[in-house]
Image (spheres, rainbow, N blue to C red):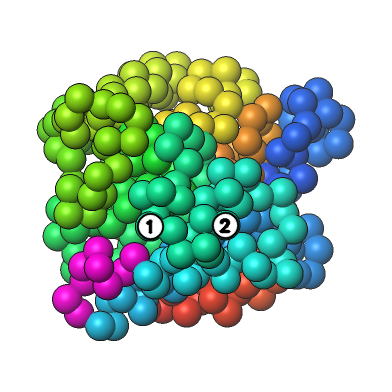
Amino acid sequence: MSGRRASGAMFGLAYGDSLGAPTEFLTMRQIHRRFGPDGPEGLDGDPALVTDDTQMAIAVGLGLLDALANPPFTPELVTPMWRRRFVDWLRSPDNDRAPGNTCLRACEGLEAHKPWVEATVTGSKGCGANMRVAPVGLAPGLTDETRAGASQLQAAMTHGHPTGLAASELTAFAVRWLADGTAPADLPGALRDRCLEQRAVYHERWLGTLWRRPGMPDPETFISRGWDECRDVLDRLVDAVARGDRATDPCEFTGAGWVAEEALATGLLCFLLFPDDPVRAIRRGAASSGDSDSIACLAGAFAGAHLGMDAWPAEWAGRIEYADELAKLGAAWD
């Protein structure tokens, strides 16, 4: 097994994002006509540009790095750090990559100094919740409870729907488990088990009164809805992996990925179809009819966490946009 798994995951998510960016709004027919049946072959341009997916993952990562440098790691410590990074992203001149409306709206509320529980978009479970969570999976030394709370909090600051929270936690744990050496084939079962174990667990210390926003009777009812939706899509994932169809649009099996639980499942599907070929995995994500950049971004994070930095083409590292930030985060956690 290769080393440098944190670098592998951070660069992998950016590579997938970059490969998927030009196909995000194309049909399968348009993708096949322009790129062939297997999608874009490699990075385009120098630098190869990424989207808001990578920008936001870096924001989460840098805020996390700041917080971990000032222990103990608590929600009170990290929340203002993430707020600052999200507002910096909102106002960045490079924030011109078709960012999601939920992220923009919530970050405007954060900029206006609203409590995040009021700034968040309550009903949104868009994939912006979990396309950026990989750093929380990569940071070493967190307890499971802290990793769960932090991954849900970073989602909840913009996406207040319980399924966005659960999908973000599962994404972070998938990255962590792969970096720790979990066999890819064991991942869907482990994630489904976590859905059942955590079904009634509401992390009040991290999420505060978020559960009250949609008029739920209690925190357990609120959060269980998210875990149930994730478990449903993981069941579809298990069926799709068993089928082993590497040629069909993966969105046909596990969804288009515009929402968090589908982005998780379809990104995982692309990785699990090619567990030892990371470039094929992200090309499969890019050659999809749905939210191709987010699907390929997640597939790249999973593949890099599993295989490490050396599994990616060596010449890509110098060409990807934000290489310095990606390298900083990877080196901190490798």
Is residue 236 shown left or right of residue 222?
Answer: right
55 within the magenta span? no
Residue placed furthest toward the right: 33
The spot of residue 280 in percent (x, y) is 59, 43
> Is residue 133 found left or right of 279 in the rendered image?
left
Position in image of residue 298 (x %, y %): 49, 46
Residue 217, position as x, y percentages in the image: 20, 25
- Residue 169 visible here: no
Secondary structure of the residue carrying tag 1 is loop
Residue occupied by mark 2: 108
Residue 19 vertical placement versus 11 (above, below): above
**Which residue range is magenta in the image?**
71-79
Can the viewer see residue 90? Answer: yes
Residue drawn where x is 27% and y is 37% of the image: 211
Precedes in sequence: disc 2 or disc 1: 2
Q: Which amino acid is tagged 2? A: Glu
Query: Is the residue 25 above or below the residue 55 in the image?
Result: above
Magenta region includes residue 76: yes
Residue at 19% across, 58% down: 146
Q: Which residue is mark 1?
A: 115
Q: Quadrant of the N terminus?
A: bottom left
Kindly identify the residue that appears in the image at 47 percent across and 79 percent down: 328
Residue sitting at 47 percent across and 71 percent down?
A: 84
